[in-house]
Amino acid sequence: MFARTALRVAGRRIARPAAVQTPVFRSSFNSSAKNADPEVHVASFAKGQRKIESLEVPATGNGPVAPPGADEKKVAVPFKKDGYSHLTPTLAKFTCPDKVAVITGGGRGLGFNMAQALAEVGVRGIAIMDVQKELGEAAAQELSEQTGVDVRFYCVDVRDSEGIAKTVEDIADHYGALDILINAAGIADSNIKAETYDIEKFRRLIDINVTGSFLVAQAVGNQMIKSGKGGSIVNIASMSGSVVNYPQEQSCYNASKAAVIQLTKSLAAEWARHGIRVNSISPGYMDTALNRVPALDAQKRIWVDHTPQKRLGAVDDLNNLAVYLASDGSAFMTGNNCLIDGGYTLW
Ligand SMILES: NC(=O)c1ccc[n+]([C@@H]2O[C@H](COP(=O)([O-])OP(=O)(O)OC[C@H]3O[C@@H](n4cnc5c(N)ncnc54)[C@H](O)[C@@H]3O)[C@@H](O)[C@H]2O)c1
């Protein structure tokens, strides 16, 4: 077993600062039912200092999710506060100065890119939740170094209700606020015929994409209600929640994203009285690690052909919509599902 860099005391978390250069963690998160003593691994990066902590949580039956592939790298630029006073009222509404954001699935892909975008419009704190520890920590470090934002990484599975509750509590304690949630964690299964779909596989995907989105929204929503300041929740659904993809069979994923869209509308209706807005983004086919696998090469040609803009979405193509939904620019919008798909769903 690896030596731990974090010290733990029952019921408390304690931290030890470490040099930013150390690239690898030795503390571990394992929420398998076999592990009697699981913990949420927390890495934070502020003012050039890396700090490692851990939160204890009771064991659940979850395991890691590690899709292969790699994204095109984009570099974020720091938000300059002195420039803010020069913005027109309309442009100022598209910023999120001094807000705090939580982003699930922020270790890579669309989630990480939207985190970069929020840093570029002034958020002061970003908490990334992801189940992949090395990836998530590297993402948090990269984001903090690029933008100077106080970034924390929580290695936690969105299916783990206790881990999520502790994590969200810790985020609120650390930043003293919680204003934005982007629920981007999700997995996809495709090319599986309904008549032979393995039921455990089916349940697992629904658990991550639907229950996971709900659990995080519930925990964050409760913090937003408690603060009395409201907030903005953005769920990453998919065009697959509105249309059936072609040519691959993926009934479970499609059903899961339809559920995310309806969950969005339901939460928006329930929480409007608390000043919480809830909207969803439904991307079309995006050029992320999720789709950068050789097995999908032939299908990708069909996807591009069926997309009026004749391309997949870039990994940062959701960024400005996410900023709009997170910011006061969209103050009167709630319960909306925004398709952003290069026109795919037009035909
Ligand atoms: N890429 C696309 O074409 C596309 C299209 C429509 C919708 N989406 C949705 O956008 C979201 C992000 O997709 P992406 O392409 O960036 O995928 P990705 O696989 O690159 O990133 C997803 C991230 O979520 C994390 N994750 C997965 N399961 C988790 C869990 N149980 N708990 C915590 N973290 C978990 C992964 O570790 C990963 O870092 C997903 O919800 C996906 O369904 C993607």
Image (spheres, grey):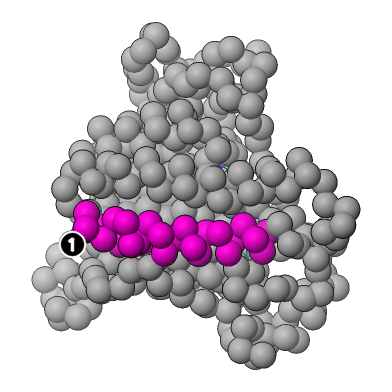
202 vs 236, nearest the viewer: 202
Does 148 sit above or below residue 290? above
**Residue in view at x 53 percent, y 70 percent:** 282
Type of amino acid at the residue the image marks with label 1: Lys
The quadrant of the image that shows the C terminus is bottom right
**Residue in view at x 88 percent, y 53 percent:** 196
Q: Quadrant of ligand 1?
A: bottom right
Does 303 sit above or below residue 114? below
Q: Disc 1 designates what residue? A: 81
Q: Where residue 132 sits: x, y (%)?
A: 59, 39
Does 23 sit above or below residue 274? above
Q: Quadrant of residue 322?
A: bottom left
Q: Where residue 332 sits: x, y (%)?
A: 25, 74
169 vs 66, nearest the viewer: 169
Seen in the image, is 199 located left or right of residue 70? right
Q: Where residue 165 sits: x, y (%)?
A: 40, 32
Q: Which residues are magenta?
A: 253-278
Q: Could you say whether the residue bearing mark 1 is in a helix, strand or loop? A: helix
**Residue in view at x 64 percent, y 69 percent:** 240
Seen in the image, is 28 located left or right of residue 181? right
The dominant secondary structure in magenta is helix
